[in-house]
Image: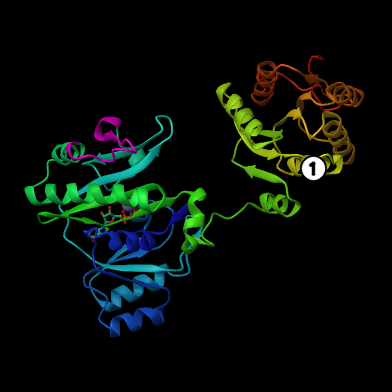
Amino acid sequence: MVRLEEWRGKEIFRRYGLPLPKGVLVRSLEELDRAFEGNTVPFPCVVKAQVLAGGRGKGGAVRFAETPVAAREAVAALLGTEFKGEKVSAVLLEEKLGISRELYLSVTLDRSRRLPLLMASSSGGMEIESLPDEAIQKTWIHPMSGLVAYQRRKVARTLSLPGPAQMDLERILNLIWRIFREEDAELVEINPLALVGDHLVALDAKMVVEDDALFRHPEYEGLQGELTPLEEKAHEKGIAFVEIGGDIGVIANGAGLTMATLDVLLQEGGKPGVFLDLGGTDDSRKVAEAFLLMTEAHPKVVFVNIFGGVTRCDTVAKGLLEAMARAPPRFPLVARIRGNNEKEGVAILKAGGVGSYTDLAESVRHVVALEEGREQATPTVGLRTGGSP
Ligand code: GDP
Ligand code: MN
């Protein structure tokens, strides 16, 4: 997921011909002074910190200035500071337009329906999450037919705009759909899309570009979200490790099984927080390393779900015990290992005091119960032993 700052989004918008305010981007006060000399700063102006976080308007990161002196003050006050944990290294100065209404418009991917979704609302300006459902008009777009004329007209009509703005909107709808497709976006959002006189202008731009399409976009290199320190460490060791902010640690092998394990945990009401894909390995030391990494993430409970193939069950079991001997875990461990060398693996774990499950549903319920504190881990070894197969 690559999130683009407003000015990058607007550069793309401009290329496609969306109506935008005039503006200039500066990264320092020297650049600002050059912009003053070149008369490229419009007045009165809006001074906007370029960060990925939303809510800049409310948070003081969008300011207004009538004069160069005031604009300079605003830029100086924003550059180099932090907004919601992000350093402000660029500021956008745009002409301040007299706006009479603020609309919301976006195209995103509705993963549950597996279709692109166009959302439009006449209550723009605020974050979409804070709008009641009935205030948002949703139009699902078939990827083959695209956003068709009657859909555009319907959306344009329901926003009760003056004639010229209604025509603008139909054109804008076409453009954001094209941008969504052609720029490999996961999200294209204009909030607010402002009514200025009888016409519409995009005052803000938010775009998220799909990771898997990055090979087509060398221009975004280096913009990819940063890794957490643990993810960085894992990356160096060649372990696929992702932190997503929950309680349950998942160790599985292969992307498919790892994802399926997360899905089943979520379905049972669990909150997976870290997951680690062992991939194909026949090295118990690598398994141990992976497990130690998991320990550092401080999960509430760890679920090991292995289907032995290239990665044999006994290799995994040996690795787990090796890691536990080096750093006794402070969390309960639930294991389910099946497949190649299953018997050996189960026996090794059992000798080390770790029971293992064969049934997925049963083991997952147990994991979630431990997470929620409905069941307690065996206190002596700090490990919960499940029913033996
Ligand atoms: P966000 O809060 O981070 O989404 O930043 P926005 O770019 O959406 O700006 C926040 C608010 O500033 C908008 O909802 C507008 O009310 C206001 N704003 C931004 N640009 C202009 C402008 O050109 N004229 C006026 N009058 N208000 C503006
Ligand atoms: Mn906005």
Indicate whether residue 324 is drawn in magenta: no
x%, y% of residue 26? 38, 73
Q: Is residue 298 visible?
A: yes
Quarter of the figure with the C terminus: top right
Residue 89, image x and y in percent?
46, 68
Whether residue 1 is visible = no
Residue 101 image position (x, y, % from top left): 17, 49
User: Is residue 231 rendered to the left or right of residue 61?
Assistant: right
Residue found at the far front of this picture: 144
Residue 193 as seen in the image, left or right of residue 283: left
Outermost residue, right side: 351
Element on which disc 1 rests: helix
Q: Residue at x 40, y 73 (%)?
A: 76
Q: Quadrant of residue 381?
A: top right
Q: As drawn, is 382 to the left or to the right of 19?
A: right
Image vertical order of residue 322 relative to residue 57, above or below? above
The residue at the point 35 percent across, 48 percent down is 180
Residue 143 shown in magenta:
yes
The residue carrying pointer 1 sits among few (fewer than 14), some (14 to 19) or many (20 or more) residues within 10 Å by Cα, namely some
Extent of the magenta region: 133-150
Q: Nearer the viewer, residue 23 or 314?
A: 314
Place of residue 227 in the rendered image (x, y in percent of width and height, measured from the top left)? 61, 53
Identify which amino acid the numbered label 1 is placed on.
Leu
Assign ligand 1 to one image quadrant: bottom left
Q: Residue at x 75, y 39 (%)?
A: 280
Residue in the foreground of this view, choosing between 370 and 190: 190
In the image shown, does 163 or 294 lie closer to the viewer? Answer: 163
Kindly identify which residue carries mark 1. 292
Q: Is residue 265 shown above or below 122?
A: above
